[in-house]
Amino acid sequence: MEIPYTVEARPDTGLYNAKMGIWLFLASEVMLFGALFSTYIILRTGNPDWVQHPMNVPLATLNTMILISSSVTVIMSWVSLRLKNFARYRMYLAGTLVLAGGFMVVKAIEYNQEFTQGLFPWSDNYMGIYFTLTGLHGLHVLGGMVVFGYLLGPGAKMWKTAPEQYVNRIECVGLYWHFVDLVWIFLFPSLYLL
Amino acid sequence: MGGHNSPEDIKKETRTYLLVFAALAVLTIITVTVSYLDLNRAQAITVALFVATIKGGLVAAFFMHLMSEEKFIYSVLVLTLVFFVALFVLPIGTYADAVGDHFVMEGVEHGESEAH
């Protein structure tokens, strides 16, 4: 049996399956991160003796720039694929993967610095919420990298068999990646600058 | 969203993405610069979250194409927004409700709960 609406949009929603799926998933992600942000506010406003450790702002700024750049490369990969330029698409998606890897390396350097200073998730409430939020965000970056790797490697076969569906897949992973970028845009000032 | 695949349309789209990227980079620099200014806490939070909201808005509107999406997606997002706001308002409201409820118990200071 052929699954309907993998490429063309359903007439009632105007969306193909994967796009509806990714948006519902992103809605659940909003609630997941929202719960943690809410927890952060409660913890911080409820504690008059809140300890705010100075974080590495230059490294976090670098990571912000890396993620913003990766949002552009992932959207350029989708644009290239729509223009049927597979070589350029691969270049942009590989660039996104490298940038995502760069983000993780910078984050690892930061974590290492914090561990060296004796700052661990159990040190205090700030470090607890800091590691929870950045760790969960890091897992999302890692998840994105796995999908990028798949789409560049074995998943790329679909370009030959079902090119339109493949373009849709890139659009959906792009939406996910922009969400990961969006979360970081709020994490950065909340955890590092305030 | 989009779906216009003519090279001219895509070229125009690409220019928009690059402009948004430039705006995001500038706003990031502004956020960091402002954090080094001598602002009080309320001002610092207001400016930081205001700039972050603009940046988030740009990503959502242009990169995620929410400027021109299907009604179904807007419906999902409005519903999410309602629960998202509740997620913040309810616990914060509960906490704020207790502010000023200073109670005195033997051995426990003002405003502190017994369970420590």
Image (cartoon, coloured by chain):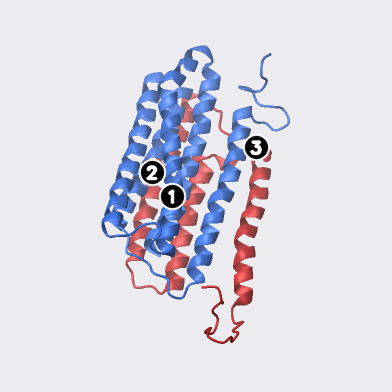
Q: Would residue A84 be seen by someone viewing this image from the given angle?
A: no
Left or right: residue B88 versus residue A192 is right
Residue A183 location in percent, x, y? 47, 49
Q: Would residue A190 be seen by someone viewing this image from the given angle?
A: yes
Label 2 element class: helix
Quarter of the picture holding the N terminus of chain A: top right
Label located before the other in sequence (2 or 1): 2
Give the number of the disc on residue A184: 1
Between label 3 and label 1, give the one nearer the viewer. Answer: 1
Chain identity for the colour red used in the image? B
Of residues A131 and A81, the one drawn nearer to the viewer in this rendering:
A131
Residue B110 lies, with reference to residue A73, above or below; the image says: below
Q: Residue at x 46, y 54 (%)?
A: A186
Q: Residue at x 43, y 58 (%)?
A: A128
| Residue assigned mark 3 | B70
Give residue A19's quadrant in the image. Answer: top right
Chain identity for the colour blue used in the image? A
Amino acid on which disc 1 is placed: Trp
Label 1 element class: helix
* Chain of the residue under label 1: A
Amino acid on which disc 3 is placed: Glu
Quarter of the picture holding the C terminus of chain A: bottom left
Q: Residues within 10 Å of mark 1 (few under 14, many from 20)?
A: many
* Chain of the residue under label 3: B
Q: Residue at x 57, y 42 (%)?
A: A26
Cβ atoms under marks 2 and 1 closer than 8 Å: yes
Amino acid on which disc 2 is placed: Leu
Left or right: residue A65 versus residue A11 is left
Q: Residue at x 45, y 53 (%)?
A: A132
Same chain under badges 3 and 1? The reply is: no
| Residue assigned mark 2 | A67
Between label 2 and label 3, give the one nearer the viewer. Answer: 2
